[in-house]
Image (cartoon, grey):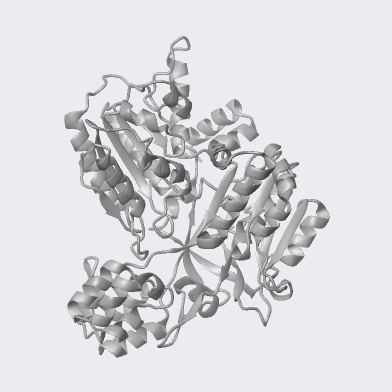
Amino acid sequence: MTIKEKTSSDIVSSIFEPELLKKVQQLAPAKLQWLSGYCAGLAENLAEPLAASFVSPATLSEQQSDSKVLVLYASQTGNAETLAAELSQRLQAENIPVTLNSTLDIKLKTLTNFSSIVIVASTHGEGEPPDDAIDFHEAIFSKKAPKLAGVQHAVLGLGDSSYEFFCQTAKDFDSVLSKLGSQALLQRQDCDVDYQADAQNWIQQLIEKLKTIQPQKQELASTSIIPLNNKSEQLYSKNNPFKAAINATQKITGRDSVKDTYHLEIDLADSGIHYQPGDALGVWADNNQQLVDEILQLQGFTAEQPVHLNGEDISIQEALTKKLELTLLNKQSLKQLADITQSEALTKIIDEAYSDYIKNHQWIDVLHLSNAQLSAQQLVDLLKPIKPRLYSIASSLDETPEEVHITLNHVRASNEYAERYGLASHYLTQELTESDELNIYIDRNKNFKLPADDKDLIMIGPGTGIAPFRAFLQQREINQAIGKNWLFFGNPHFNTDFLYQVELQKFLHKGVLNKIDLAFSRDQEEKVYVQHKLLEQADRVWQWLEAGAYVYVCGDMQRMAKDVENALLLIIQQQGRKTPEQAKNYLKQLKQESRYQRDVY
């Protein structure tokens, strides 16, 4: 640590109590921006009101902002929020008045206060808005939405082209702003998983546009933040991963289970990597060699046949093994292949059955179906880059200082050609063994974090959704947290699928886990899931909510998470004697207070 770093650290430690410092360090970028601006304003003139260009959500709803540019973010994991914060900083550096806010906090009527509206939006799942944008998305499409004649807008979308409704949330916002009378300031940019270059180029174009139309302030309050020393974040990242070794791989479901669930322990010794409960582990995986060989054989390629990819010449085998996505399909590439092959069968699937088809088919199957005979370069140009897979971390760094643990299912699906496997789950559980190395990094999740130690937790995590709650419980035990912990867990069968059963029993015995409700769906004639267990405990759940409990949900987004949210709304409505609309507002308030957090996929 340098003298400067040590001095900054000493100053921070002398100002903040440890618990307060921990809360500040866990704040999302947008809130840090506002807090730093607030402190700068106080330092400049204690007698004057806050002059920073980043304003608090409460202030924004009560008064018209001096800012002419509103930057909104709709973010699930924090990427959209980070880009929005960066854009706001760069606009402020150009002396352009700007307000940064979340779609969760913005009041619809305040949109008319701004001459330019910029939205950075991710898309969750099958075209759905992220959690913090659900209410705003619904409201702006309603009759309550204000007319925006005279306003200009720009939208940046983050998504994944392997999903059918790529960047749908951004497309929705772009469309509705235009319908409300706003004019597009810049063409919408839809970014894929490797979004950095496209996003930076779009941001630069936007700044140049705004500089020509927005008045510039001469002086703005500083919003600089004392940098926290985090060497590992500088050393290892998505684009510069750490090469770690596997310490242990253990199957944790029984022999007769319908699921193959594994617990992995990965060595972090000497890496300097830090993570918190709620973060995810990013894993870069190689494609299965048998799958690569099958494609080479089908297309008549030799392994060493050269192709050009990302500015370099490599063999087709290396490109297919380490560089290109073979297990996930995307509609854009399939349309391109259909145009090349003139395959009617493929065209029909794209038009009529795409969503169902991609669930259990991969690129090898599409090549079979379309009878494609491509050149090696044509195939490489069709395929998207491999993207890392993210797994919720199942350990506390304080409990396992030199390891990170994850919990995952070995994904498999059968189709008319053969059995197919998930990229990373097969790589991790079937191809790698102890001491083998893999490339990893920590993916921070600022929207899924433990509260103060005196707060109660309700954790809902069926299946592998239990992973972060194992980490939560380990951390709460180490912290000697006085808040109570209640876990809802479910899986098909008690005898074969009770993940981490011994550990959970120990947590119960020690009093770390105060209550556990179990839903083993197939142990009785009528299936029982975690949402049913929530409803059985409706009165007690309501008591915990009213007492300030924090609710966490992890696992399947398509069914479980929606069913759990509907159960919570019903509990709030019935136990709290509220109308459906009041129940929705109650849940929205929980989100705004970070008391309802989800890590769903």
Residue sitting nearer the eye, 399 or 406: 406
| Residue 83 found in image quarter | top left
Q: Nearer the viewer, residue 242 or 466?
A: 466
Q: Name the residue at the left extreme.
A: 212
| Number of numbered discs overlaid on the protein picture | 0
Q: Nearer the viewer, residue 249 or 4?
A: 249
**Quick check: 437 left or right of 538?**
left
Residue 516 percent coordinates (x, y):
75, 57
- Residue 449 point in image, percent of width and height: 58, 46
Q: Is residue 582 left or right of residue 314?
A: right
Q: Is residue 70 above or below residue 433?
A: above
Q: Position of residue 321 (x, y in %)?
A: 36, 77
Q: Answer yes or no: is residue 447 visible.
A: yes
Splitting the image into 4 quarters, where does residue 182 fall? top left
Whether 183 is drawn above or below 175: the answer is above
Q: Residue at 57% of width from left, 60% of height from top?
A: 560
Which x, y percent locates residue 388?
42, 64
Q: Residue at x 39, y 53 (%)?
A: 123
Q: Is residue 313 visible?
A: no
